[in-house]
Image (spheres, rainbow, N blue to C red):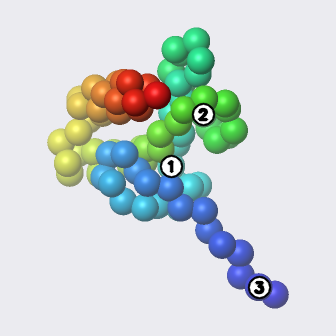
Amino acid sequence: MAQRKIPMRKDIVTGEMVPKKELVRVVKNKEGEVSIDPSGKKSGRGAYIHLNVDVAKKQKLIRLLIKLLVLVFLMIFMMN
């Protein structure tokens, strides 16, 4: 049997490519509401983040994570 391809996504915190199942998707919909998408199927612009506390502590990004997400979403929507 052929081995299946594992979908990879880029973690916006570390910039690393990680298997999709290890990440959580954050979505901004047309109404401007930001929400977590555990299924990965909500419509709207999304970004993937790895919710590993050790990674966040190592990079000192626990408090900056929310600001980073807002900045990324603003940049994405200003481009469109």
Residue at figure coordinates x 47%, y 44% from the top left: 48
Residue 69 seen in render: no
- Quadrant of the image containing the N terminus: bottom right
Q: Position of residue 22 (x, y in %)?
A: 52, 54
Indicate the amino acid at tag 3.
Answer: Ala
Which residue is at 60% across, 62% downward?
7
Query: Going by the picture, which residue comes out furthest to the top?
Result: 31
For disc 2, the neighbor class at 10 Å (few under 14, some 14 to 19, many from 20) is: some
Callout 3 crowding tier (Cα within 10 Å): few <14, some 14–19, many ≥20: few
Q: Earlier in the sequence, mark 2 or mark 3?
A: 3
- Residue 67 lies, in percent from the top left, at 28, 26
**Which quadrant of the structure image shows residue 56?**
top left
Question: Residue 79, image x and y in percent?
Answer: 40, 30
Pointers 2 and 3 in contact (CB under 8 A)?
Answer: no
Secondary structure category for the residue under label 1 = loop
| Residue at (33, 54) in percent of width and height | 15
- Distance from disc 2 to disc 3, alpha carbons, whole Å, reads 30 Å
Spatial CA span between label 2 and label 1: 10 Å
Q: Which mark is residue 23?
A: 1
Residue 2 left/right relative to 9: right
Question: What kind of residue is marked 1?
Answer: Leu
| Quarter holding residue 27 | top right
- The residue identified by callout 3 is 2
Regarding residue 4, the answer to whether it shows in the image is yes
**Residue 6 image offset from top left, x and y in percent:** 62, 68
Look at the numbered disc 2 and give the secondary structure of its residue: strand
Check contact, mark 2 vs mark 1: CB within 8 A: no
- Give the labeled residue for mark 2: 37
